[in-house]
Amino acid sequence: MPADPAAQSSPFDQYAWDGTVDPVQPLTQFQESLIASAVPAGAQVLEVRPHRRWDDRLTYPVYVRVSSSSGEATVLVRMERFRGGVETEAAILPILGRVDLPVPRLLAGPAVDPSHPDRGAASVLTVLPGKDMQQLSLGAGAAELEHLGGLLFQALRLLHEATPMVRDDPAAEHIPTVSLADELRAIEVRGGPWLDDRQFRAAVARLLPAAAAEGERVPLVFSNGDYNAGNFLSDGERLTGIVDFARAGFEDPFYGFAKYWAYDMQPFLGTGVIARDLAAWGVTDEQFALRLAIRCLWTLQREVHVAEHEGGHGRYREDLRALLRRSVAASRDTPTRSRRS
């Protein structure tokens, strides 16, 4: 189905909340009840471990080790700061399981804690083996990074190749479909102060015809919606899992890579791993510039204030503006040919 953008003007309104885990009580009574519905009766919680730390905050998801008559097991309590993300993922994971993709299994939920309805739903998932590739990349040598990059692209090909099976599943009717042109139209519909910025508004107008033309040439594919290396798991040798489907849907196959540039995601970006693999996939600099420009617009409108927050925030805004200028200049009004995944 087409994108259904909300016409809102405030940055950061895509987030239901900040996803912070209470360090004193990392597991709520509601979450304990949800876990109890997913594991054998009489199971006891042995350990609760938040997955990551951002800006000195512990954030979801949360690993929970439990014991029961059948032994010990670890499950994942999933909450998502993106609005509707847990619900989207919970609808999609059973479909992906039916097409044999290496994804978590939904054990319980999605369900909303009546004490905190503003935080959205929670779910309980199985834990896949391996470490995320972002962790594995830190301190990795050149050869290791190239190998991890290859595994990342292997995972994305698996998702893309599953497109017809996912699309044909009766339960897939509510999976979003968003083309490059849809992304730009959503920016226009959303409005807000960024559309009063001359550079921003001119970029949207220039890119829309090219995005529409590219959409005619490059078929949309199924995607997890977030190509961040942290969402792909490996044992160091092979791919072991794909996680985080909060933003999953049918989209342009190469658009998701633009976030590596928009967020300066290291070390994959700085070492050229992503750029080399994109080139090997047949994506030209010109074609990618279109996608990068759209991602810059999306990020500015959704995550950056037009004029506030000087210092580090101001520098980030100006870096994105510069990246937008370069990528718009590098893209053509009409793409020259199709690239398929």
Image (cartoon, rainbow, N blue to C red):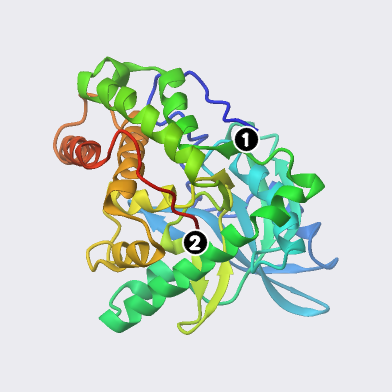
Q: Is residue 42 left or right of residue 262?
A: right
Helix, strand or loop at label 1? It is loop
Q: Quadrant of the N terminus?
A: top right
Label disc, if present, on residue 231 of the rendered structure: 2
| Element marked by disc 2 | helix
Q: Quadrant of residue 10?
A: top left
* Mark 1 or mark 2, whichever is nearer to me: 2
> How busy is the neighbourhood of tag 1: few (under 14 within 10 Å), some, or many (20 plus)?
few
Decide: is 153 above or below 6. Answer: below
Amino acid at circle 1: His
Q: Which residue is mark 1?
A: 116
> Measured from the top left, where is residue 275 in percent x and y?
30, 62
Q: Nearer the viewer, residue 285 or 255?
A: 285
Residue 298 as seen in the image, left or right of residue 63:
left
Quarter occupied by residue 143: bottom left
Q: Which mark is residue 152?
A: none
Query: Marks 1 and 2, Cα distance to the nearest angstrom?
Result: 27 Å
Q: Position of residue 209 (x, y in %)?
A: 38, 28
Q: Residue at x 28, y 77 (%)?
A: 139
**Residue 146 image offset from top left, x and y in percent:** 34, 77
Query: Along the line of sight, which residue is nearer the eye, 304 or 226?
Result: 226
Q: Is residue 38 visible?
A: yes
- Of pointers 1 and 2, the one earlier in the residue sequence: 1
Q: Is residue 107 above or below residue 337?
A: below
Amino acid type at image mark 2 = Asn
Q: In the figure, residue 116 lies in which quadrant?
A: top right
Residue depicted at 19% across the width and 35% down the height: 325
Foreground residue among 119 and 330: 330
